[in-house]
Amino acid sequence: MLLVGGQGTRLRPLTINTPKPMLPVAGVPFTVHQITRARDAGVTRIVLATSYKAEVFREFIDDADLGIEVVIATEDEPLGTGGAIRHALPHLDSGPDDPVLVFNGDVLSGVDIDGLVRHHRDTGSDVTLYLTPVDDPRAYGLVPTDQSGRVTAFLEKPKTAEEIVTHNINAGCYVFTRRVIDRIPAGRPVSVERETFPGLLAEGALVTGVVDSGYWLDLGTPLAFVQGSCDLVLGSAPSPAVPSVGDFLTLSGAQIASDAQVHGGTVVGRDSVIGAGAIVNGAVVFDGARIADGAHVENSIVGVGAVIGVGSVVRGAVIGDGAVIGRGNELLDGARVWPGAQIADGSIRFSSDA
Ligand code: GTP
């Protein structure tokens, strides 16, 4: 089961038109990287738990041939992570004691999917969580385990050094024994992180964690989104769906001037244009965008059909679909331009520090 129904608020304005898992990453919608990894690990059937902009998934899946059966469940109202899992239950073929893999729809990882399921079966766990160690866990809920791997608590974000009892966090991928899903309350919002998992611990259920320190990234923020895309293109993040690994990826119909510099895992989208002398480093340029002569785009996302004017500098920014940035502007460090916005020549020098 893939949970793909969130609104992706942290990635606005990109998610105004397209739900986060359908945003193109290294040439294909992000969800395709997850689906093909699961397929290659032996998964034969996936339920997409949709809510926000469900029709975008439906249109794509109807036409796609991903070599795996994909079924779509759609909530009328968003039910949260646990509510979405419960809502999709009728679409599962699994028996009550079978393992059900559940992935958040925005996690890029190299986790050993088969190993996770094996661990779940071998330990007889009710739920197995994939845990990943992070250097600075202050932005995350912590998941400590005992020596046998049994989860002992689900802790809120730590506020002091003493509260950092582990560096392991919930990586957004679980194996549920199906009968545990049967017991999630139906028809109302439920959070697995805040309600289901702590409830299972309180009643003495066996919840275990598998710590995997391989590649892991939550693509929830613009900077993480750019990083994930670049890592896929550069080959440092694993996916069977990347067309070719290299310093940059050019999609069909894109034109790059001979003296432009494009590198750092940049994706140049279909029919987009990079002008003379432009520098594009570690960026995601969506389809039909135009980076004019001498412009400099770095660690940024340039939306579908957006235009970056001559000599403009865009660094650490998100430019919405169809926005037009006139010549000689500077958009830095967290700047976000809404879809269709027009910025006149030389009118903006933006930095969130300013
Ligand atoms: P932000 O709004 O930026 O926090 O992103 P998000 O909407 O993706 O929320 P979050 O990262 O917390 O969600 C984790 C995963 O669960 C994502 O893959 C979401 O798509 C998914 N998700 C969150 N809420 C729902 C929901 O109500 N229904 C369904 N089907 N999926 C959900």
Image (spheres, grey):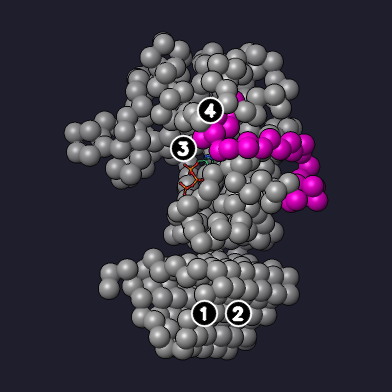
| Residue 5 included in the magenta stretch of the image | no
* The furthest residue to the top: 204
Q: In the image, which is nearer the foreground, mark 3 or mark 4?
A: 4
Q: Amino acid at mark 4?
A: Arg
Q: Amino acid at mark 3?
A: Ala
* Residue highlighted by disc 1: 342
Q: In the image, which is nearer the foreground, mark 1 or mark 2?
A: 1
Residue visible at 49% across and 58% down in the picture: 12
Crowd band around label 3 with a 10 angstrom C-alpha radius: few (<14), some (14–19), many (20+):
many
| Quadrant location of the C terminus in the rendered image | bottom left
Callout 3: SS: strand
Q: In the image, which is nearer the foreground, mark 4 or mark 2?
A: 4
Q: Are marks 1 and 2 in contact (CB under 8 Å)?
A: no
Residue range corresponding to the magenta coloring: 59-86
Q: Is residue 206 visible?
A: yes
| Residue 295 position within the rendered picture, expressed as x and y whole percent measured from the top left | 49, 84
* Residue highlighted by disc 2: 290
Position of residue 100 in the picture relative to residue 354 (left or right): right
Nearest the eye: 150 or 85: 85
| Residue 343 position within the rendered picture, expressed as x and y whole percent measured from the top left | 48, 81
Crowd band around label 1 with a 10 angstrom C-alpha radius: few (<14), some (14–19), many (20+):
some
| Residue 200 position within the rendered picture, expressed as x and y whole percent measured from the top left | 44, 17
Q: CA distance from mark 3 to mark 4?
A: 24 Å
In terms of sequence position, does the residue under pointer 4 or pointer 2 come before the other?
A: 4
Q: Amino acid at mark 1?
A: Gln
Callout 4: SS: loop
Residue visible at 54% across and 13% down in the picture: 124
Residue visible at 50% across and 24% down in the picture: 128
Q: Which mark is on residue 171? A: 3
Q: CA distance from mark 4 to mark 1?
A: 42 Å
In terms of sequence position, does the residue under pointer 4 or pointer 1 come before the other?
A: 4
In terms of sequence position, does the residue under pointer 1 or pointer 2 come before the other?
A: 2
